[in-house]
Image: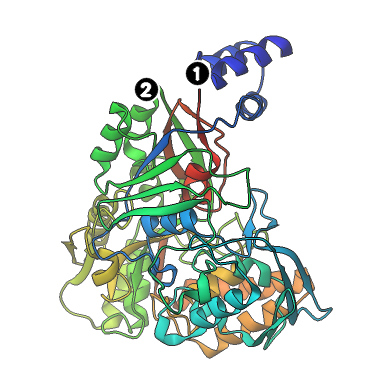
Amino acid sequence: MSNELQYLSTLVAKGKMHRRAFLGRASALGVSSVFANSLLVGAAHAEGPVKGGTIKLGAPGGESTNSLDPATYSSFIPFQNGKMFGDTLVEVGTDGNIVNRLAEEVGASDDAKVWTFKIRKDVTFHDGKTMTPADVIATMERHSDENAKSGALGLMKGISSMKVDGDNFVLELKDANADLPYLMSDYHLIIQPNGGKDAPDAGVGTGPYLTKVNEPGVRHGYEKNPNYWDSSRGHADQVELIVLNDDTARSSALQSGQVHMIERVPPKIAELVKRIPGVELKNAPGRGHYVFIMHRDTAPFDNEDLRLALKYGINRQEMVDKILFGYGSIGNDMPINAAYPLFSNDIEQRTYDPDKAAFHFKKSGIDGSVLLRTADGSFPGAVDASQLYQESLKQAGISLEVKREPNDGYWSDVWNKQPFCTSYWGGRPTQDQMYSTAYLSTADWNDTRFKSPEFDAMLLSARGELDQVKRKQIYRDMGVMMNQTGGLICPMFNDWLEAISDKIGGWESNGNQAMMDGFAPIKCWLKA
């Protein structure tokens, strides 16, 4: 049996047998799907990687206002651009552990306040200049500057000093933080020449691909970096990222062979995509979540009773069933789920309760309807989800006005600017990073305007707490506070749902972010 499956798995890797047929045979032989899939992964790597060709990826989250400046990244296409041309000091592996990249060693003082990153030598930028620790410190300085408007600004607030010491980049924290390497993996913190202070949007880094085409909102083209320091990445000669914000257009492009991969398959068509010849559906549970965000400091959402009314008035299970089609799980009005190792599963789950929603709405004293802005580009099915929300609120006597906004410009003109809108977060590797990025009072991406000195103090306390039991309790208290008083309505956590051509080899399951944490076009290859 084992020899037969081993042989069949090689046929799948060579594109001579469809994955579904292989899994069907494995099932008939009484083999678990987990074991069968492990054989496929092993066979794919045994057959590869294959060098050459052009990989094309179709994805949403691209706008005419996009920049190549890593500080500005807030949606998928910019995130993917950064992965193509840039590297960070460290990355988070598929197992959740830190992987050294431009930093070849990472060390900390006993109190976790001083961190030393030994910077890799003989790495060159795309402009031919050698990367040095001076470029690293300049990068961190730029993202610490409020004028840069970096999405990593909240993470940098905890640094008290930085210096270069020979081959090392050394930083000292105001307070201890055992998770500091995870913060340095943030996708904004791409190391650039002189930190990007001279040309932040030049698309120049140390990454596996050179930027050749930059047409924001349309497409981005890359060519293999012949001087890349890591031969295990960058197998294709070229990679093209095609902006396809429309769900139907993405699926059609994959079916017709226009692209080899698509990010964000709408769950409602997942079963149809599975049946497309030569196409494989990929899904990985993770920390991503689809949300409705309220600005807690802006009327009428500064009214706690209104926020509670809107939280009790959403039917989470209906969202998971009808929007995610089961490819996800219910949320509890905080950005943390069981994918985080220090998650507390004993926090009471808020459920749909029209009576409580009506009670709090009446108590709020708010008259008239509540305006919600949305666009399909904010998350798959966002418009449908908004209409479901509208109907569930009706049962509580609350009128929700849904305004559909254009996809182009949504992330620059609506998100983080309008007081009530739909959005999504990809999550972060640790609770500290998620909270620091979006809920610390000083965070530039605090898109619910959640500003609480008590919450900030707990976050800082958790960073320096080395007793995991105590640390977990602090995070539990933070979750309860956000659930009860925050401006986040989080009805569901989504699986990463993507689809690829069976011509693609080297795919790995990665729950950190979409498209194998952005590494799919970099780590995968076109089969011979």
The secondary structure type at the circle numbered 2 is loop
In this rendering, the answer to whether 162 lies above or below 101 is: below
Query: In the image, what residue occupies the spot 69% across and 72% down?
Result: 473
First reached walking from the N terminus: tag 2 or tag 1: 1
Asked if residue 416 lies left or right of residue 317, the reply is left
Q: Say which of 97 and 330 sits in front.
A: 97
Q: Which of the two marks, 2 or 1, is nearer to us in this view? A: 1
Answer few, some or many: residues within 10 Å of disc 1's Cα (few below 14, many 20 plus, some between 14 and 19).
Answer: some
Q: How many marks?
A: 2
Q: Say which of 328 and 144 sits in front.
A: 144
Three-letter code, disc 2: Arg
Where is residue 26 shown, x and y percent of the image? Answer: 61, 15
In this rendering, the answer to whether 108 lies above or below 84 is: below
Question: Which residue is the site of mark 2?
Answer: 275
**Can residue 32 be seen from the camera position used here?**
yes
Q: Residue furthest front?
A: 128
Where is residue 193 shown, x and y percent of the image? Answer: 51, 71
Colouring rule applied to residues: rainbow
Where is residue 288 shown, x and y percent of the image? Answer: 47, 55
Asked if residue 56 lies left or right of residue 507, the reply is left
Question: Which residue is the site of mark 1?
Answer: 15
Q: Say which of 407 and 186 sits in front.
A: 186
Q: Quadrant of the N terminus?
A: top right
Query: In the image, what residue occupies the spot 41% across and 70% down?
Result: 488
Answer few, some or many: residues within 10 Å of disc 2's Cα (few below 14, many 20 plus, some between 14 and 19).
Answer: few
Query: In the image, what residue occupies the spot 33% across and 84% down?
Result: 302
Asked if residue 88 lies left or right of residue 273, the reply is right
Quadrant of the image occupied by residue 458: bottom right
Quadrant of the image occupied by residue 166: bottom right
Three-letter code, disc 1: Gly
The secondary structure type at the circle numbered 1 is loop
Q: CA distance from mark 2 to mark 1?
A: 17 Å
